[in-house]
Amino acid sequence: MSAVIQDLVNRPYEAGFVTAIEAETAPRGLSEDTIRLISAKKNEPQWLLEFRLTAYRHWLTMTEPK
């Protein structure tokens, strides 16, 4: 990288425009807690949460194809 580009990349942001973005993180992987978190975030009805949890528990019993 040339010195001019390096200087442009490393200087502080001067325009003052900022967009606040909410971000929510979940632990890596899939678990019942993650399913509950996503369902609560989406304001899903209880029956849909139960359906998803039942499907997840069934998925846990399955073996991965080779």
Image (cartoon, grey):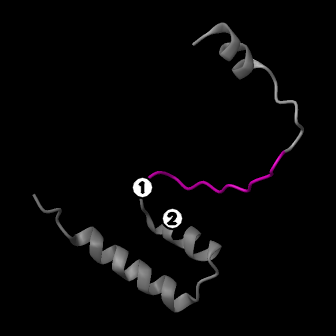
Disc marking residue 29: 1
Residue at the image position 46 percent from the left and 51 percent from the top: 28
Residue at the image position 43 percent from the left and 63 percent from the top: 31
Q: Are marks 2 and 1 in contact (CB under 8 Å)?
A: yes
Count of labels in the image: 2
- Amino acid identity at mark 1: Gly
Give the residue furthest to the bottom. 47
Q: In x, y percent, where is residue 46?
A: 56, 88
Q: Earlier in the sequence, mark 2 or mark 1?
A: 1
Q: Which residues, given as a range, are shown in magenta?
A: 18-28
* Secondary structure type for disc 1: loop
With respect to residue 7, does 62 lie above or below? below
Residue 15 is drawn in which quadrant?
top right
With respect to residue 11, does 22 lie above or below? below
Distance in Å between CA atoms under marks 2 and 1: 8 Å
Query: In this rendering, would 10 be left or right of 25?
Result: right
With respect to residue 16, does 65 lie above or below? below
Label 2, on which residue? Answer: 34
- Amino acid identity at mark 2: Thr
The main secondary structure of the magenta stretch is loop
